[in-house]
Image (cartoon, rainbow, N blue to C red):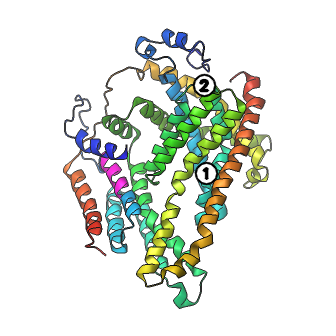
């Protein structure tokens, strides 16, 4: 029963797909239904993590706090990512998870362009993790850091927010130089701060996730 | 991809190629077709993208609130309406005239949030009024790949399980005197994270296996088109909603509404 779910080693992968039913055996290493379900389960957990991160960053830092949403999410969801990578060990899993998350974010009212970020970064993360055959700890950590940038989509509107306010000030007859002065350091500064925070938090979260993986799952023989 | 989705949503409604299954599927539906909801979401996003004028924004918000109210979500509708009104009012403040420069922060925030509210309104509408099977059915109709559809099914199916697991984990923790009380979780964040997330993940791996077995038994792994008991169809109301929502945006772009 467990055979479709054991993390597939690359060498025995073709053999495994052959043992599956005929239509799925076409491409070795292709994601099968069991894999897709595993991805779905982890995507659900990841989505819950994102919701918690939204809550935390909004409560802690007010309305503009959502600029730190990806950082907080990266900090807490390392375990989920590492376990998915370890259990699946196939190309496509991380990508699909990113796309599904992007889809749910869009349906729940986030910005459409966030969809692009949630495709591009997970694909990159997937490629990096594949370079290490989903085993290399360093590459997994790097891939998690890249993956975390996939969540920058939801904070893109903040950039539009500034433009909107500038437009509304201009409509009321303020001059542009004065307006720029109001925002100059708020915007670029906090942007780089947020991007840097993602990097640091993702490194911490990924490290924590790998530690937890070793402590709980390797010992229990799940991974 | 986005534009594609939208196009196919318009085209896919024509053939209505699904075999006849549910006999009562065409009974009166209080909500719009999922694909119309998608269109509303896109329209809301378009407004964000193109910085529509305030008049257009107000018109659109009112338009977006109508289906929400029609679906019987009175409280949500009212909340959104009040929030939007408050933000708009705050955004119109003139900090300099009042002599309080720091009000710029509040005012900017209000303008920004008012701008994002249409997205949240349509999002809330789409999220609360679409059943899981409708969502899946419309995704299949729009030719979304199975690799995306199946995880989506699982995500929707898995949310209640997570909530249930979480309650049980917290009970077990309380029994052992760990992080009991309201602020207990926040005192040792790393420990709380570990104690809650690890059992959730442990369970997730088991559930993933169970679900796979169940789903394969039910034929989720079959190639080819899947039938659905839920039927979705674009009605007159759907087309009407699309047209009505498009008009203010087009007028805004043409520069009529200012």
Q: Chain of mark 2?
A: A
Q: Locate residue A117, reporting x and y percent.
A: 51, 47
Q: Locate residue A181, reporting x and y percent.
A: 58, 78
**Can residue B250 be seen here?**
yes
Q: Locate residue B192, reporting x and y percent.
A: 74, 45
Q: Locate residue B67, reporting x and y percent.
A: 32, 58
Label 1 and label 2: CA atoms lie apart by 25 Å
Q: Is residue B206 or residue A216 the one in the foreground?
A: A216
Residue B217 in the image: above or below residue B106? above
Q: In what element is the residue under mark 2?
A: loop
The quadrant the C terminus of chain A occupies is: top right
**Can residue B161 be seen here?**
no
Q: Residue at x 49, y 60 (%)?
A: A157
Is residue B106 inside the magenta stretch? no
Q: Earlier in the sequence, mark 1 or mark 2?
A: 1
Dominant SS of magenta comes to helix
Instruction: State the image quarter where residue B252 is shown.
Output: bottom left
Question: What is the span of residues highlighted in magenta in the rendered image?
Answer: B34-43
Instruction: State the image quarter where residue B1 is shown.
Output: top left
- The answer to whether A6 appears left or right of B17 in the picture is right
Is residue B42 inside the magenta stretch? yes
Residue named by callout 2:
A89
Q: Are marks 1 and 2 on the same chain?
A: yes
Residue A210 in the image: above or below residue B234? above
Q: Chain of mark 1?
A: A
- The answer to whether B25 appears left or right of B180 in the picture is left
The quadrant the N terminus of chain A occupies is: top right
Q: In what element is the residue under mark 1?
A: helix
Q: Residue at x 52, y 54 (%)?
A: A154
Residue named by callout 1:
A70
- Number of other residues with Cα within 10 Å of mark 1, as a class: few under 14, some 14 to 19, many 20 or more: many
């Amino acid at each position: 029963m467990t055979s479709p779910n054991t993390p597939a080693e690359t060498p025995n992968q073709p053999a495994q797909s052959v043992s599956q039913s005929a239509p799925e055996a076409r491409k070795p290493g292709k994601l099968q239904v069991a894999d897709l379900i595993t991805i779905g389960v982890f995507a659900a957990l990841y989505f819950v993590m994102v919701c918690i991160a939204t809550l935390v960053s909004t409560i802690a830092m007010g309305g503009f706090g959502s600029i730190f949403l990806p950082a907080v999410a990266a900090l807490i969801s390392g375990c989920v990512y590492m376990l998915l990578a370890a259990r699946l060990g196939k190309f496509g899993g991380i990508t699909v998870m990113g796309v599904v998350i992007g889809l749910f974010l869009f349906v729940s009212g986030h910005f459409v362009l966030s969809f692009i970020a949630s495709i591009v970064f997970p694909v990159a993360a997937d490629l990096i993790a594949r370079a290490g055959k989903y085993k290399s700890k360093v590459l997994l950590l790097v891939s998690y850091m890249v993956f975390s940038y996939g969540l920058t989509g939801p904070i893109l509107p903040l950039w539009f927010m500034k433009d909107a306010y500038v437009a509304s000030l201009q409509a009321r007859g303020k001059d542009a130089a004065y307006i720029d002065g109001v925002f100059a350091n708020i915007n670029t500064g906090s942007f780089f701060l947020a991007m840097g925070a993602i990097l640091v938090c993702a490194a911490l979260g990924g490290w924590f996730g790998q530690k937890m993986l070793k402590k709980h799952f390797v010992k229990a023989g799940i991974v | 991809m986005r534009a594609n989705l939208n196009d196919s949503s318009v085209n896919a409604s024509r053939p209505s190629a699904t075999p006849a299954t549910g006999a009562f599927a065409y009974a009166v539906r209080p909500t719009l077709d999922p694909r119309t909801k998608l269109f509303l979401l896109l329209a809301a996003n378009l407004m964000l993208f193109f910085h529509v004028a305030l008049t257009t924004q107000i018109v659109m918000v009112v338009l977006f609130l109508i289906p929400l109210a029609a679906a019987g979500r009175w409280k949500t509708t009212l909340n959104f309406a009040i929030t939007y009104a408050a933000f708009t009012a705050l955004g119109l403040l003139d900090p300099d005239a009042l002599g309080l420069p720091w009000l710029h922060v509040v005012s900017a925030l209000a303008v920004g949030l008012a701008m994002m509210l249409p997205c949240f309104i349509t999002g809330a509408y789409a999220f609360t009024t679409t059943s899981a099977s409708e969502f899946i059915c419309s995704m299949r109709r729009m030719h979304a790949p199975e690799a995306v559809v199946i995880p989506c099914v699982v995500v929707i199916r898995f949310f209640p399980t997570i909530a249930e697991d979480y309650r049980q984990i917290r009970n077990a923790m309380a029994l052992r005197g760990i992080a009991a009380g309201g602020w207990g979780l926040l005192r040792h964040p790393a420990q709380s994270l570990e104690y809650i997330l690890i059992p959730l993940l442990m369970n997730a791996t088991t559930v993933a296996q169970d679900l796979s077995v169940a789903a394969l038994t039910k034929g989720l792994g079959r190639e080819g088109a899947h039938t659905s008991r839920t039927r979705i169809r674009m009605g007159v109301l759907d087309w009407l909603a699309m047209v009505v929502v498009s008009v203010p945006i087009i007028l805004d772009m043409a520069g009529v509404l200012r």
